[in-house]
Image: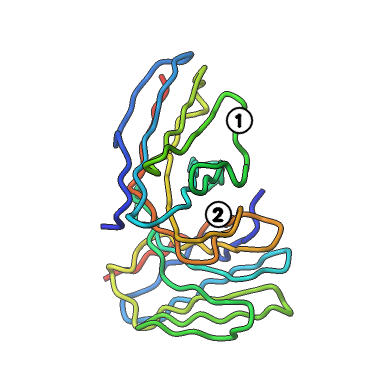
Amino acid sequence: DSGVTQTPKHLITATGQRVTLRCSPRSGDLSVYWYQQSLDQGLQFLIQYYNGEERAKGNILERFSAQQFPDLHSELNLSSLELGDSALYFCASSVSPSAGRMNTEAFFGQGTRLTVV
Amino acid sequence: SQQGEEDPQALSIQEGENATMNCSYKTSINNLQWYRQNSGRGLVHLILIRSNEREKHSGRLRVTLDTSKKSSSLLITASRAADTASYFCATDSKDNDMRFGAGTRLTVKP
């Protein structure tokens, strides 16, 4: 158990819909990272938050947004969903204080499998 | 875009044999990490090697780093069927957030 909790584990939704994925980081970790893993794209970095503030952006679509709350949990919002958004979405946390960097080990949740039909 | 690129994409060996996976990257790094992923599960951190280190060991794992060649290797000795998984390298650099390669799919046959 990594200590990172992601909910829900599975999500099936229709095209055009909006979903919210939730992540609770490991106790004490201030950095939260979101990754998308699909078969053809591998593991793609989406966005990082550190202590409530956005620190780094990767290949995140404009239809996607995220935030980190005062209690440090994070949510990834995916809207106007398309078939191609079907993927595993992972959240990771680390103690790393460095903006946009992960210079310590990261702890990954078990992921949310999103299926868009 | 990805920073680390693992090689080979897939590797199949017999139990007891050693498995070697390589990772190449493009820009200067602060550290490089190796992770393991069982099918459909979250990634698990294996080892972190900093740019000023050349070799690190952890149990049956041995990681080397050659910054002049911008490459790293992960060696798993005396492999077991339970080592079957995908292995990813991830690089951390001044200008980039942590980026993962596409992974090496290792199959260890009993």
Q: In which image quadrant can residue A113 be found?
A: top left
Q: Of discs 1 and 2, which sits in the foreground? A: 1
Q: CA distance from mark 1 to mark 2?
A: 20 Å
Badge 1 and badge 2 both on one subunit: no
Residue A52 screen position, x and y as percent: 49, 42
Which chain is disc 2 placed on? Answer: B
Q: Nearer the viewer, residue A88 or A57?
A: A57
Q: Nearer the viewer, residue B25 or B13?
A: B25
Which chain is disc 1 placed on? Answer: A
Q: Nearer the viewer, residue A105 or A110?
A: A105
Q: In which image quadrant can residue B13 be found?
A: bottom left
Q: Residues within 10 Å of mark 2 (few under 14, many from 20)?
A: many
> What element does badge 2 sit on?
loop
Residue A27 screen position, x and y as percent: 32, 55
Residue drawn at x 62%, y 61% as measured from the top left:
B4
Q: Are marks 1 and 2 in contact (CB under 8 Å)?
A: no
Q: Which residue is mark 1?
A: A61
Residue drawn at x 49%, y 84% as measured from the top left:
B56
> What element does badge 1 sit on?
loop
* Outermost residue to the front: A70
Quadrant of the image for the C terminus of chain B? bottom left
Q: In which image quadrant can residue B83 be found?
A: bottom left
Residue A114 screen position, x and y as percent: 39, 31
Q: Is residue B31 left or right of residue A95?
A: right
Q: Nearer the viewer, residue B4 or B75?
A: B4
Q: Which residue is mark 2?
A: B102
Q: Amino acid at mark 2?
A: Ala
Q: Amino acid at mark 1?
A: Leu
